[in-house]
Amino acid sequence: MEQLQLPLLWAMLCTYIASFMLYAFSIWAKRPQIRAFGSQIAWLGMVLNGVLMVLRALLINGIPLNNGFEFGMCFAFALVLTFNIVERKFDLAAVGVFVLPIAVVLSIWLLSVDMSIMPLMPALRSYWLSFHVTAAVIAYGTFALSFALSIAYLIKEKSSIKEDSLPQLQVLDEVSYKMIFIGLPFLTIMLITGAVWAEYAWGSFWSWDPKETWALITWLVYAFYLHVRFIKGWKGRKAALLSIIGFAAVIFTFIGVSYLLPGMHSYLAG
Amino acid sequence: MLKFLSSIGLALFLIASMAGMAVIATIVGNDSVYTSVPFLGLVVAFWLNLLLCTIKLLPQLKIMWRRNITDITDTTLGYDCYVGNEENLAQLHKYLQKGKYHIEEEQKETQTKIFAKKNKLSLLAPHMLHVAILIILLGGAVIFMTTTSGGVFGYVDSESNLPMSVRQAIGDKSAEPIERGEKSDDYLSVQDFQTVYDEKGQIDNWVTRFDLTIDQQQVVTNGETKVNAPYRYQNMMIYQNSYGNHYEAIITGGEDAGGYVLPDGQHNFLADGEKTLMFKGLSDGRVLLKVFKVDTEGAEEVLIGQVVEPGDIVAIEEGVTIEYLRSKPYTILEVKVSKGSGIVLFGFLLACVASLLFWLGRYREIMVIAENEGNIAIKVVCKNKMVLESIQKELDQQLQKG
Ligand code: HEM
C-alpha cells in the first residue's frame, strides 16, 4: 500500500493544477461559467488529498500528523476544504486562481520530502502532538486563504481595468479578516497545546526554540492585524499587506525554520 | 500618562517590537536576547499595558453585558423602516426565534418594543483572552524566577543524590556540598530501568522506577517516570532524560590490572598506548568486546572482536586477561523544582475557553420599535460590518420594506 502514496500524490497535484488552470482560464476568457467546473475539480483534488490522508493514516495506524510530509498533506487539504466552503458561502469562486497555486506548490513540495514511514521517537508519541498539529493545520489553512484573498485584493485594486471577474474589494477584504479571526484562536490553541506537551516531554513550557519562537512571531503578527483592524480601522491595502506578512511568517515557521535554523523541531524537515 | 500606558498605540508598538526582536534573535541564533534587559523590559511594559487596558475596558464591557430593552432609544438614527402589519411582526418573531436570539418584549399602549440579542458570551472573549495572557505571563515570570533543575545519574539498584541546587530549592537546610560517593539526605534509588517496545518492535518509551527519599524520609515508593509522563512530587518534577549502559570488567596481569567500569562504544587506551579496548552493546542486547591496535596516525586494526557473556574471560595479550562481569544499565533523570506551572496552566485553560467563545460568533443586537398604527423600525447593532450587513440583508428579504 505504501507504493500507492506517490501515484495518489501525483493525481492530487495534477487535479489541483487542472483546477487552477480552469479558474485562470475563466478569468482570462471572461467566462465565469467555467469557474463552476474549476470548483468541481478542486473538490475532486480535495477528495484525492483526503484519500491520501486516509491511506497514510492506515499505513501508520494513527493520525497522519507526525512529520513534514503528513503535515503538508493535511495543510493542503485544510486550505482547499476551507476555500471550498467559503467560496460557496461568499461567492468567491474566482479567488480559486490564487488559492489553488498554494495547494499546487504544497503538493510539489510534498513530492520533494521523504514520505517513508519511520518509527516515531518516544517524545512524539503523545496525544498532545495530535491536538497541537491539528490546531496548526486549521489555523494555517485559514491563514493561507486569507493570504490568497489579500493577493486578490491587491491585484484587483492595482489593475487599471478593475478586473471585474474578481469579487468586490470589500468582500475580499472582509472575508480575509474573517479567516484571520477564525484562525487566530486555533493558533492560540496550537501554541498552548505545544507548550503543555513540551512541559511534559522536555520539562519546560517554552524554550525559545526557533520554530516555537516563529510560531509566536506569527501569533503576534496576526494579533497586531486584529487590533489595527478592529480598533484603528485599518482596512483594504494595509490589512492585506499585514495578512501577507502573517502568511510569510507561517511559511517560514513551517518550512524555513526547519531548513534554515537549527532546533528541537527540526525533525519536521522530514 | 495612564492614558498612554493603557493605549492601543503603545500595545501595537510593543507587539511589533517584541516580534522584531524575536525575528532578529532567531536569525542571529542568539538565545540570550530573550533574557536580556531590553526584551524583558518590553515584556514587562506589554504586561502593564495589557493590564491597564483590560481594566479600562471593564466599564464598557459591563455596559454591553447589561444592555436590555431599556436601552432602546426612540431616535430614528440607524433604524430601518418596515411595513407595520401583523404579518411582518410575526415574520420578525419567527426570524428572531429561528436565529435563537434572546428576546425581551414590552407592550405599551401605542407601541411594542423588542430587544433581541445573541452570542452575549462572546463579548467576554477578548477580555478573557487578555486576562489569560496576563496570567500566563505572570506564571511564566514565577517559573523563570523559581526554577532549579539538575540531572541525576543512577545505576539500577543504586542510590543517587539529588543535585545540590534542587536540595536547596526543596528547603533542605542541611543541604551542603557532599563528597563524591557520600550519601546526602535527599536521594533517588533507581529500582529499575526498562526500554519498552511497541507491537512492531520499535522503541515506545523508556521507563525508570525509583524510590525517593527526602530529608531521610522515603516519600515516594516505586514512582515511575517515562518520556511524556514525568513523575510529580509536590513542586518537583522528575523527567526521563537519557539512558545507557556501562560495562564492568576486571583486568588481570600487566600494568592495567584492576577493576573498571567502561562506557558504551568508547575506545579506552591500555597502558601500552598502542591498544584500545571497547565494549559495545548490540541492538539485540548482546555485548561485544573489541580490542584494537591503533597506530600513530590513528588507523585502527581489530585484534579481537567477540560477543561476551558475564563471567567470560578473554586474553587480550600475553599474560593479560579481561573478565567481563556485567552490564550496568543507568538512567539519567532530570529533576526540576519550580513554582508557577499551575498559574500558567490555569491561564492556558482560560485562553482555550476564550478561543471557544470567539467561535460562538459576534455579539449582535436587534432593536425594534413597532408603532401600533405605523411602521416597524428596526436597528441592528454589531461590531462586525459583514455580520451587520448580512442581518440587514436577511431582514430585507424576509420583511416587507416600508
Ligand atoms: C498579543 C496579545 C494580544 C492578543 C492575542 C489579543 C487578542 C485580541 C483579540 C482576538 C481581540 C478581538 C479582536 C476582534 O474582535 O477582531 C482583541 C480585542 C481587543 N484588544 Fe487585544 N490582544 C492582545 C493584546 C492587547 C493589548 C496589549 C491591548 C491593549 C493595550 C489590547 C486591547 C484590545 C482591545 C481594546 C480590544 C477590543 C475589545 C472590544 O472592544 O471588544 N489587546 N484582542
Image: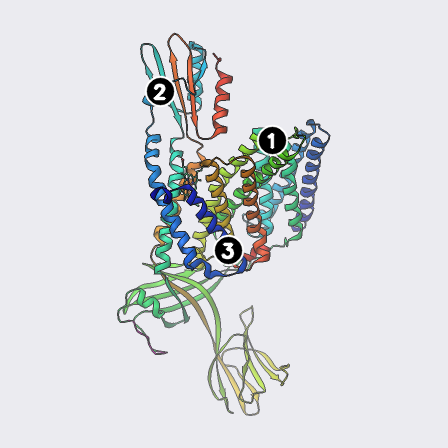
- Nearest the viewer among B311 and B138 is B138
Q: Do the residues labelled 2 and 1 touch (CB within 8 Å)?
A: no
Q: Which amino acid does label 3 sit on?
A: Leu
Is the shortest distance between ligand 1 and the CB of mark 3 under 8 Å? no
Numbered-mark total? 3
Q: Does the magenta stretch include residue B180?
A: yes
- The image shows residue A92 at horizontal and vertical percentages of 60, 31
Is B193 left or right of A120, judged from the image as shown?
A: left
- The image shows residue B161 at horizontal and vertical percentages of 35, 71
- The image shows residue B94 at horizontal and vertical percentages of 43, 18
**What range of the chain is rendered magenta?**
B175-181
Position of the N terminus of chain B by quadrant = top left
Disc number placed over residue A124 in the picture, else none: 3
**Ligand 1 falls in quadrant:** top left
Q: Which amino acid does label 1 sit on?
A: Leu
Q: Do the residues labelled 3 and 2 touch (CB within 8 Å)?
A: no
Q: Name the residue under label 1.
A: A92
Q: What residue type is labelled 2?
A: Thr
Q: Name the residue under label 2.
A: B73
Q: What element carries label 2?
A: loop
Q: What element carries label 1?
A: loop
Q: Callout 3: residue from which chain? A: A
